[in-house]
């Protein structure tokens, strides 16, 4: 079970790193295979698969099948119903809490839930909170009003609501390719409030220093995606820095 693996790693006082693969960006499985080898060798703990725009489900399943060769959990991170795949290990069941559109909070979830049960995917219940001082793909597509970086109190309120609703994870999302990642002060305030709820932070993390700062501030899991596509060597350094924590 993926949740157990995460819990076990966290209980030994380690931080986790997840590598995000956006299926829309994968044009070549050979390239992906090389990328996976590098990030897995560096110590990444799981591979997230997802993005904001539509892809064909069989393309997602092909990517998941490739991940299986690397003996790391594959976790779906769907932007919409088309992000589902039968062969993944788990799904981040993300409710985009600060969306203005109920579809992204509960609507798509209702449509997908019976199918998720039928295929037996492990579900990781996640309060997904979009933050930042600008729009990104996720805020535009998900109709979210990003919480500004100077309003950590609002982030705390959303994160607490997620915890009180019984969600096991809170994901602070600055948006893929964000100009600045979530500030340390914001991460610290949210972690202090949600305590044992697992805190995932991603979006705009491009250096090992930033990743380490965010982990030190209280993030349990660091996610990087764009850097893997743009500067694989830097991605490796980020993973190593997180795993040293
Ligand atoms: C996006 O948090 C992830 O969902 C990763 O963001 O692509 O900026 O690393 P980046």
Image (spheres, rainbow, N blue to C red):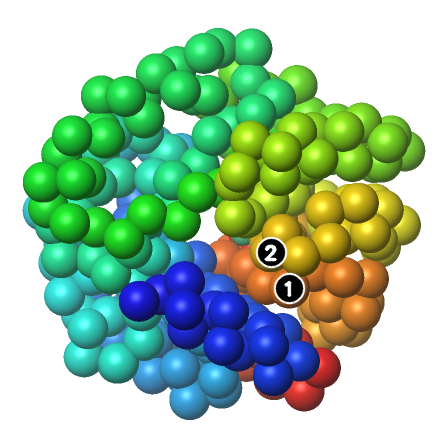
Q: Camera-side residue: 120 or 216?
A: 120
In which quarter of the view is residue 229 placed? bottom left
Drawn side of residue 212 relative to residue 206, left or right: right
N-terminal-most mark, 2 or 1: 2
Q: Position of residue 235 (x, y in %)?
A: 56, 73
| Location of the N terminus (image quadrant) | bottom left
Identify the residue position indicated by label 2 in the image.
198
Q: Position of residue 122 (x, y in %)?
A: 27, 53
Does the numbered disc 2 mark a residue whose Cβ is under 8 Å from ligand 1?
Answer: no
Q: Secondary structure at mark 1?
A: loop
Identify the residue position indicated by label 1 in the image.
220
CB under 8 Å between callouts 2 and 1?
A: yes
Residue at 64%, 43% in the rendered image: 172
The dot on residue 40 is none
Q: Is residue 233 above or below residue 1?
A: below
In which quarter of the view is residue 75 placed? bottom left
Residue at 89%, 50% in the rendered image: 185
| Location of the C terminus (image quadrant) | bottom right
Q: Is residue 116 above or below residue 25?
A: above
Q: Residues within 10 Å of mark 2 (few under 14, many from 20)?
A: many
């Amino acid at each position: 079970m993926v949740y157990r693996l995460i819990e076990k790693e966290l209980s030994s006082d380690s931080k986790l790193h997840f590598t995000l693969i956006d299926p829309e960006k994968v044009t070549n499985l050979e390239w992906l295979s090389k990328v996976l080898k590098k990030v897995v060798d560096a110590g990444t703990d799981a591979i997230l698969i997802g993005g904001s725009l539509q892809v064909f489900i069989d393309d997602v399943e092909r990517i998941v099948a490739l991940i299986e060769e690397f003996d790391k959990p594959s976790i779906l991170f769907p932007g919409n119903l088309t992000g589902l795949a039968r062969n993944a290990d788990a799904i981040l069941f993300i409710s985009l809490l600060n969306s203005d559109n109920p579809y992204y909070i509960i609507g798509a979830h209702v449509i997908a839930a019976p199918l998720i049960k039928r295929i037996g995917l492990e579900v990781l219940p996640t309060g997904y909170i979009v933050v930042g001082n600008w729009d990104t793909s996720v805020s535009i597509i998900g109709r979210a009003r990003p919480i500004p970086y100077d309003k950590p109190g609002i982030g705390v309120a959303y994160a607490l609501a997620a915890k009180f609703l019984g969600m096991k994870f809170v994901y602070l999302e600055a948006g893929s390719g964000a100009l600045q990642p979530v500030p340390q002060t914001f991460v610290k305030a949210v972690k202090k409030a949600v305590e044992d709820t697992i805190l995932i932070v991603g979006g705009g993390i491009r250096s090992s220093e930033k990743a380490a700062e965010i982990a030190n501030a209280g993030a349990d899991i660091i996610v990087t995606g764009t850097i893997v596509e743009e500067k694989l060597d830097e991605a490796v350094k980020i993973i190593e820095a997180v795993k040293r924590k």
